Image (spheres, rainbow, N blue to C red):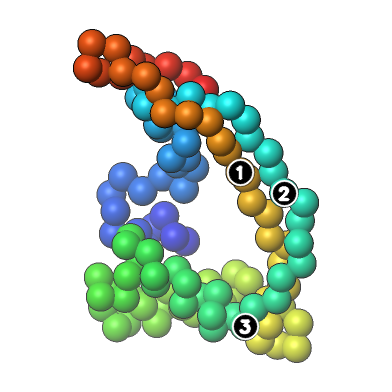
Amino acid sequence: MTVRQSRSPDFDPQFSLVDALCHEGHFKLAGRVGTSPIPFRQPVASYVEQFHSTASLARELMSREEAIAFDRAIEEIVRPWTVAGDVLEMDVVATLAWGRPHALSHGRPGPTLC
């Protein structure tokens, strides 16, 4: 749904800033770890609204009708995970990455893989 409605033609939901920086030779990854899942509850309306805080799905870039249709579609998608009709229950996880800026060679970084 978000890919179809995105206003960014090159939107890639799998994009990783860390991987891009490594690939371009700007960053040397030292490690990466994922957190344990933490239960999180949020009103469905707040969950839906957070999509509009992104550049590719900003309300200002959608017609009123498109925004309403998008909101309703997301509400329908998440409905199976709601409790009490309007609260979304989910587990939240994060991936932490650390490392150092890559040293420049002849004034330019060289491509590398993490």
Q: Is residue 73 visible?
A: no
The picture places residue 11, in percent across and down from the top left corner, at: 36, 48
**Nearest the eye: 112 or 51:** 112
Secondary structure beneath dot 2 equals loop
Give how far apart the Cα atoms at labels 2 and 3 are.
Answer: 23 Å
Q: Residue at x 58, y 26 (%)?
A: 30
Q: Which residue is mark 1?
A: 96
**Nearest the eye: 65 or 56:** 56
Q: Which residue is mark 3?
A: 43
Closer to the chain start, of discs 2 and 3, is: 2
Secondary structure beneath dot 3 equals strand
Give how far apart the Cα atoms at labels 2 and 1 are.
Answer: 8 Å
Residue sitting farthest toward the left: 107
* Label at residue 114: none
The picture places residue 70, in percent across and down from the top left corner, at: 43, 73
The picture places residue 80, in percent across and down from the top left corner, at: 71, 73
Secondary structure beneath dot 1 equals strand
Residue 96 in the figure: left or right of residue 4: right
Q: Check whether the beta carbons of the residues at disc 2 and disc 1 lie within 8 A of each other.
A: yes
Q: Is residue 9 visible?
A: yes
Q: Which residue is mark 2?
A: 35
